[in-house]
Image: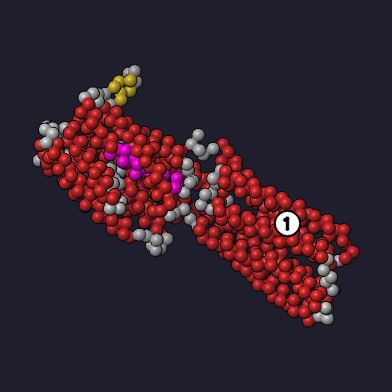
Amino acid sequence: MDIAIIIFLFGGLFLGWSLGANDAANVFGTAVGTRMIRFKTAAIVCSIFIILGAIISGAGTTETLGKLGSINALPGAFAACVAAGLSVYVMTKFGLPVSTTQAIVGAIIGWNIYTGSPTNMKVLIIILGTWVLCPIIAGLIAIFFYTLTKKFIHSSKLHILRLDAYTRAALVLAGAFGAYSLGANNIANVMGVFVPISPFTDVNIMNIFTFSSKEQLFLLGGIAISVGVFTYSKRVMFTIGNDLLKMSPIAAFIVVVSHSIVLFLFASQGISNFLQSINLPPIPLVPVSSSQAVVGGVIGIGLLKGGKEVRWSIAGKICLGWFTLPVIAAFMSFIILFILQNIFNLTVNI
Amino acid sequence: MFGLKNTSLFGDTKKLEREIDEFVDILSEVGLVFKSIIPTYLNHSANGKFEEMVDRVKEMESKADKITKEVEHTLYEETLIPDARSDVLRLLEHLDEVIGMYQGNCYHFSIQKPDFPKEFHQDLIELTDIVVRCVEALCLTVRSFFRGIQSVRDNAHKVTFYEKESDIKFSALARKIFDSNLSLDKKMHLRYFVEKIDRICDQAEDIADEIQIYSIKRSV
């Protein structure tokens, strides 16, 4: 493989690494931070299920991003990834709970503008709509599960030690589901822009199954996310567990479940097809923000408790992120594309 | 694998549950023995039985100590209930102090042999009865903390009620002692014993208050 291709792919792998470093904490942060689960356990479960989610269910959201703008040259995809990664870094420095999802969408639009390609407005509106819906649905699911769990705990009269043991098991299961959903939903952010221009070819394994070039890309992206989980997420997990989200392990479990269901809903081709088969509108398969789903869940529980503990400033920052991050990413993407084309003489659009 | 120690996780949990239940059983039993000890002591003809009962309290206290150490060890070694571990251990230590107070009272009776005139016997027995009821209510509060947090408040309220009853009884008995014709040294000696028994209720009330805070922290 050409060395240039590897360098360009590194743009996506870097994005994957940062996703693993930051978003794995959404899935296992409280569990590890409160020492309910060991970091090693969390990292292993998280990595396995992120890769599985990416390979098995990652296609739907990738297709949606492809409809928004199909980047057709590797340097273009590299520019989009670097722009997304840098804008996330900048916004995180300002303490905003932003996501790679919003950054990559902005970066793709930046590519569209730079190359004069049309942006599919219908798809864009659907994507924007899901960003707003994501924390709201997560909040509603959290309220539902919180009420249900509270009733169960009160009626079951479990010993706190037994409850603790069950909570640990539930946190591992919810974390595995969360990691699978994260991989399925967010792999599009990491590798989506490379799919139309994948440098890999389909591999037929003993005539049993074909490992497509897309799946190979997703595996690579999944591994990059896992490396992020192992190398950098520990610190983020302890920050989440100890500083940001002071909540009981049971509340943490509910937040993880709500987050995972939302990410899964917006990534599941099966559920979308099922809804269509019973004449209901299909769920758009869109990459949504893992961090914002978590904040939605936390706010949902906070509202149920009377709303005193809800930090509305975070909700405000999320809304701000919906608009500012894509704009910044689009702007950065435009500049990087300009540099690659005019200084390095690279083709960013075929 | 995975650090969960699946094969032993639920086993350890069950063992710990049993140990904590056993610990609370001991606290309750020591109270019941103590309730019989005072009338036995006051009935001078049964001194042999009294010493037997003191030995029984001592045995139970040692067993409770052993359980506290085992629970402490398992909780830390298996990193169980990380969010409530320190609360549970503090609770067990304070409950152990109640058992220690029962035992201390028994020893003091055994060593100092206070001479309670017959006119105070009934009051002393009634005070002991209230104290034991108070600790029984504490046992219920402890059990509800572990198994059904919603009942903690109701049971803790009973502890407070008996503590007040005990204060009233203590004041009345102390007044009766000091109004009697006994010499001052005897009066002070008897007051010391009455006060020491009453203090068990103060300790029980403090623990019940603690449990209420722990249960607020643990509410889902």
Residue nearest the viewer, comparing A166 with B27:
B27
Q: Residue at x 65, y 48 (%)?
A: B69
Would residue A176 be found to the left or right of residue B19 on screen?
left
Furthest-top residue in this view: A206
Q: Label 1 crowding class (10 Å Cα cut-off): few <14, some 14-19, many 20+?
A: some
The type of residue carrying mark 1 is Glu
Determine whether A159 is above or below B165 in the image: above
Would residue A277 be found to the left or right of residue B19 on screen?
left
- Residue B150: percent from the left, percent from the top? 55, 60
B172 is within the stretch colored magenta: no
Q: Residue at x 38, y 46 (%)?
A: A236
Q: Residue at x 69, y 67 (%)?
A: B199
Which stretch appears magenta? Answer: A15-33
Q: Residue at x 76, y 69 (%)?
A: B193
- Residue A146: percent from the left, percent from the top? 43, 53
User: Please, which chain is the residue tagged with disc 1 on?
Assistant: B
Residue B180, by quadrant, is: bottom right
Residue nearest the viewer, comparing A113 with B68:
B68
A26 is within the stretch colored magenta: yes
**Main SS category, magenta section:** helix
Residue A158 can be seen in this image: no
Determine whether B10 is above or below A216 in the image: below
- Residue corresponding to mark 1: B29
Furthest-front residue in this view: B185
Would residue B50 be found to the left or right of residue A318 on screen?
right
Residue A229 can be seen in this image: yes
Quarter containing the N terminus of chain A? top left
Would residue A204 be found to the left or right of residue A49 on screen?
left
- Residue B135: percent from the left, percent from the top? 68, 62
Q: Secondary structure at mark 1?
A: helix
